[in-house]
Image: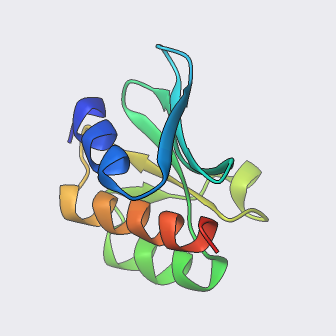
Amino acid sequence: MTPDDVAAHAESLAGVKRKGTEARPAWYVRDRLVVRLDDPNTLVVRVPLERREALVARHPETFGVPPRMEAHHKVEAYLDVADARAVREAIDLAWQMQRH
């Protein structure tokens, strides 16, 4: 999965707007973070805490939770090894959580 794939999927969701910078774009709905590109290979995705553990367990190569994110509704996705369907699922979960 590429950053362009992420952008295309995020921007296909109702109400999502691109913000951030060229180097570090982010997508928001109602001014609430959905997903952000931290570097060319790493995304930060907001996901409900109650869904995060299962998502990471099903796709351990795609997702990780570094210590700085443990208390937050966030997961990292590693684009160079990511399962594209799993990343889209995480972005969809974030979008659903943030639009309510």
Please indicate whether residue 3 sits to the left or right of residue 98 in the image.
left
* Image location (x, y in percent) of residue 82: 26, 51
Is 60 located above or below residue 10 in the figure?
Answer: below
Which quarter of the picture shows residue 19? Answer: top right
Q: x%, y% of residue 61?
A: 31, 58
Residue shown at 48% from the left, 14% from the top: 23
Q: Name the residue at 42% across, 76% down.
A: 55
Decide: is 13 above or below 19. Answer: below
Q: Residue 68, how many percent across, how many down?
A: 75, 49
How far across and how far down the image is residue 97, in percent? 59, 73
Image quadrant containing the N terminus: top left
Q: Residue at x 28, y 49 (%)?
A: 9
Total label count?
0
Residue at left offset 50%, top offset 40%: 17
**Image: 26 above or below 49:** above
Q: Which residue sits furthest top?
A: 22
Q: Quadrant of the C terminus?
A: bottom right
